[in-house]
Image (tube, coloured by chain):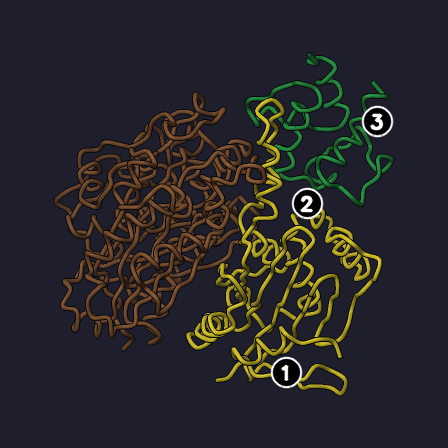
Amino acid sequence: MPQRILVTGYGIISSIGNTVQECYQSMISGVPGIGRICNIDTVLRDELIVGEVKRTLPELLDMAGIEPEEGYSRNTVLGIIASSEAFHHARLHENRQLSTGLISATTVGGMDRCELFYNDFLTNETRNAYIDSYDCADSTERIASRLDLTDFITTISTACSSAANAILLGARLIRSGKLDRVLAGGCESLTKFHLNGFNALKILDQKPCRPFDKNRAGINLGEGSAYLVLESEESQKITGNKPICELKGWGNACEAFHQTASSPDGVGAYLAMKKALELSGLKAADIDYINAHGTGTDNNDISEGKAIETLFGNRIPMVSSTKQFTGHTTSAAGSIEAILSILCLEHQVIWPNLNFSEKIDELNFLPVTRLITGEPVRAVMSNSFGFGGNDTSLIFTKI
Amino acid sequence: MRQFITAYTLIDGFKCMVNGRLLFYQENILTFADFIKALYKQEQVNYPKFYKMDALGKLGFIASELLLRNKDFKLYPPELTGVVLSNSSSSLDTDIAHYETIRDREHYFPSPSVFVYTLPNIVIGEICIRNGIKGENAFLVSESFNSELIAGYVTDLFSRELVKGCLCGWIEVLGNRCEAFLAWVENQADVAETKPGMFNPVPFDAEHLKLLKNQNDR
Amino acid sequence: MEELIEKLKKEVIEQLNLEDIKPEDINPDSPLFGEGLGLDSIDALELIVLLEKNYGIKIEDPKDGKKIFFSIRSMAEYITANKK
């Protein structure tokens, strides 16, 4: 019988709250975090709406107890805040004899500072501390250093499935006996770099996004960070941590269709979800809720929708996207949405798919449009699909 | 069941070796762009989409093409073929190119096709599209090639029967500096009989990955 | 118009990295997408950038692109009609 993977800690910071509790309050109240760009001086400032963390960088540094001279990017500080919450929740500073890994995911790395200072790095030496912070792995190293995690450290960068893949890898490392505990998740701050990039791909909606709606027009980008603590059963017996839920299944597959688009039938999404289901030992009918990738693009929602219909047949679970609340947090989405999915199990709720009016013609199901309480929620699937066709699905179950 | 490396590509600087044999080296080549184009043409790859890829994409694509172009994929179902790559610069080379298009507020033309490549794992997408691969794929970023991590990760995939064949290694490019090490890994039972003059498969583990990557041509 | 068509061919080849293709290989009336040069959705977006960068013409909705970018000639006609 393979080792059960227990979730014993979580931490998050996003546009809807700076802690798990704050995010839960926003979700329950139905209050999204989408609004005008406040922290970035970009030509797109008046055009786009985003899910920004509601703190300036000095405020974030202060929250994390970091001096400004230390060369921390906004991205890394978000990572430190969220990972610290999870770290303390699961008391990772205790029982140091247990081997503990850190797997962090990001794409922007130190971009949010470097893009500001790039033009005059050569002539202005006062910001040299940020040069080294550029690399993706730097944010991971700094988190590891602050939390004194040294047994195993790695960084994953697979676009919008990154953080989900970090959780997947963590589970594998525990199951193969290489680690007892893993702090896994991701961080991503907004940058001019990718605001402009996504805008050039013309997949951003200037209005609040409408996943699974017939008239959806694209993404609202977001930022944030989230981490889970995963423990083996044996580790949990030693730490005595109360498990929040179980990570029951996971699956990853490649679409092999296009660099940024998904296939019309969602083959990659289907394979990833199917793998996760098979690993979990559950039947399709056991899944109560899918927290969809649901970005609000023309392409993703129909592709993911088709994949869901293919896998679940006549018995489609409740489905919603929560990106209308948080924005699309790209490399952090996998872990942010994992926590939102876990909150469904904890509090026995299903999140609404906001901003929905009309069904997509080609799909046969409707997303959930209001907050659902009073229905049993025992198994939740969380999807994260990345550019490059990297598709990942995670399944969490109630203990 | 054990796994073996049955083929590998090694690109260091502007030199390319396959299975330990020198395939390409021209002294007068000075840039990565010229090198990869010359290699593409010498090997008569014939895949027009190649020209749209960024440097990381081109490097990964060619390095994998040299291993996979003659592969009989009937032995390796697409959903059971994996790709696990790594590097240290992520997509920095293309990040710089993208940044140049948005740097000047007056002359502001972000290029969608450049932006698409500002993710290190797109090269995996290109390899998978070319070969119809649909199995597990991951991209890891670390300071230098971590043979233990890659060997551990991929061996684990095999032991769980998640893959029957896996392409893994290191694809790194920044400016004119490039390095690629790709190994094709499969189960012992699937290893074809070695004919004289062919590369002798070596056991797949961290030790042998390190050995092959640091090899010079014979 | 013919001069613009020849200029456009070179610009399209450059903007879309169509390295193995020469201007004389492109028939100005042949479809650019689908069969023709095998262009995809990202190429369509790049053509929108080309129009803005080289001719000052802004296309807000990518869906308009289908008609405008049908062929080199349709591009040339659109530019002639809309150039600032």
Q: Position of residue C79 (x, y in %)?
A: 72, 18
Chain B: drawing colour: yellow
Q: Quadrant of the C terminus of chain A?
A: bottom left
Q: Position of residue A192 (x, y in %)?
A: 48, 34
Provide the letter of the chain coloured brown: A
Chain C: drawing colour: green
Q: Quadrant of the N terminus of chain A?
A: bottom left
Q: Which residue is mark 3?
A: C6
Instruction: Assign a secondary structure to mark 3.
Output: helix
Labels 1 and 3 within one chain:
no
Q: Nearer the viewer, residue A384 or B214?
A: B214
User: Image check: A102 left or right of B163?
Assistant: left
Whether residue A316 is visible, yes or no, is: no
Q: Chain of mark 1?
A: B
- At 37% from the left and 68% from the top, the residue drawn is A152
* CA distance separating discs 3 and 2: 22 Å
Image height check: is A20 above or below C13? below
- At 25% from the left and 70% from the top, the residue drawn is A232
Instruction: Report the amino acid beneath label 1.
Output: Pro
Instruction: Assign a secondary structure to mark 2.
Output: helix
Instruction: Report the amino acid beneath label 2.
Output: Lys
Instruction: Report the amino acid beneath label 3.
Output: Glu
Residue B201 circle label:
1
Q: Are marks 1 and 3 in contact (CB under 8 Å)?
A: no
Residue B52 circle label:
2
User: Image quadrant of residue A223?
Assistant: top left
